[in-house]
Image (spheres, coloured by chain):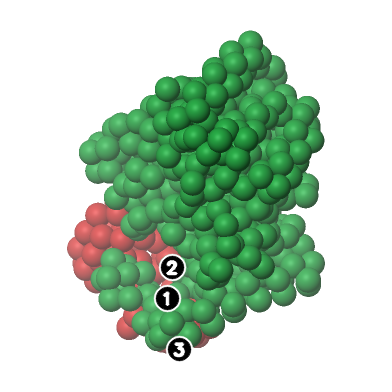
Amino acid sequence: MIQEFLGFRRPDGSVGVRNDLLILSTTGLTGPVARRIGKALPEAKVITTPYGSGVVGDDGALRDRMLLGFACHPNVGAVLLLSGKQPEAEEYRDQIAATGRPVELLLLDLNNQDSLRLTDTGIRAGARLLRQLSRESRSPAPISELFLAAECGRSDPSSGLAANPLVGHVADRVVALGGRFVAGETMEWFGAEHFLNRRAASPEIAEAIRNALARRMDHAKSAGIDLIGNNPGPTNIAGGLTTLEEKSLGAIHKSGSSPIVGVLAHGQRPSGPGCWLMDQPFYAPESLSGLSAAGAQIVLFTTGPGNSYCSLLAPTIKISANVETCANLPEQIDFDASGILLGMVSKEEATDRLITHILETASGASTFGEILLEGEEVVTRIGASL
Amino acid sequence: MENIPQKVIVQDWSDSIGVALVPIWAGEVLNIKIGTETRTVRIQNDIPRYHKFAVIDLPGGAEVLKNGEVIGRLLRETKIGEHVHTHNLTGLTMK
């Protein structure tokens, strides 16, 4: 079995599985210009946020972390930065340049507030960056250079029985070989506390897991949402799930069984190898963007009945063990894991096949989400604007 | 046998339950792969798709393992082949 992939080595030591030009607009004012440049340069990826100014405190820190996380993502080879906020944008540019990535800053203030002139300048600068990126080539990298993330969206019984445990086996294999793995979606830990507590590498990490969950539970409670009284719900029970532990373990098994080496904030980059948890929102657009801003090169996304949404920067491999879903959504499901439930493949064979699929994707094979342009990134808000 | 899709799955060798992948009827006798061994189980109740049944005799109060992890405690004695659900299994952390 192959144990390496072909990636793009970055000056900051990371390895990209793509070599993207990112057009990043950090203010609402420059969003339309960024999208216009993106239309002229269809190879480039565009991320915009309407929240440029007046984002303060923890909310401001989160915005900085996510925007810089996208800009310095291993899969991003160069950045075209657009902004209507000069001092902040210059600070971003300097931080991106410090990673060794080519970066060009385009400011409305230095272009006479003229969005058309900014568009023209941007298309020209972007074209030069794309040409530069096209001259770079891939080189072999070991599995220890992989940073994978797990996500699930729309689950059914096949998820907990096969797809999530399969991703967990891959997580264990990658971590054992020195790679990084992250699972988020804090609300999913509810009911699996005993399992996560046992896996925490230190008492401090166990406490961080408990605290992260308690904060989300309090937040739900203050919004009048009762998560304890009716969980699993009637649909879960009719579907065969009996206890909360059973439901939660079915989800959290996608992080495998390795020791948990830390709890990351939303979008925070891990400081070393191992299996990490990320304290973050539960639902796919926000949660995927947190994993991507943290620098995950590839997302393993399990689904029961199907889910087309992807990360823009991290190729998102859709995995289903539901035989009907794999048959009905052949241009969405990248990896068919239904053989596990049909008894056609063993856990070990399925794990080997998925790792091979991941290494092929890391080396340049496209996911359906990339081909069909299903990806986006969003910056989460946690406070009110000024 | 090899080419017939399996009717049940036991995820881990240590598990006390299996999960029906198709509806199974009371009285059916299944040869179930559990880790490296094959165990013969006579199903005692009708088991809907994705519902659980015991693959060993379990005393009341026993912890039930699925995919190698505890998912709850039995409210009463449960025999091999019996349906395991809300009538005889309860969670540990929440009531």
At x 67%, y 60%, the residue is A61
Q: Chain B is which colour?
A: red
Say which element carries label 3: loop
Front-most of residues A331 and B29: A331
Front-most of residues A21 and A203: A21
The residue tagged 2 is A247
Quadrant position of residue A206: bottom right
Left or right of residue A242, residue A65 in this image = right
Disc 1 residue crowd, few under 14, some 14–19, many 20+, Cα 10 Å: many
Residue A204 x/y as whole percent: 78, 71
Residue B53 x/y as whole percent: 35, 67
Q: How many marks?
A: 3
The residue marked by circle 3 belongs to what chain? B
Chain shown in green: A
The residue tagged 3 is B95
The residue tagged 1 is A243
Say which element carries label 1: loop
- On the question of residue A324 being in view, the answer is yes
The residue marked by circle 2 belongs to what chain? A
Residue contact at pointers 2 and 1, CB within 8 angstroms: yes
Distance (Cα) linking label 3 and label 1: 10 Å
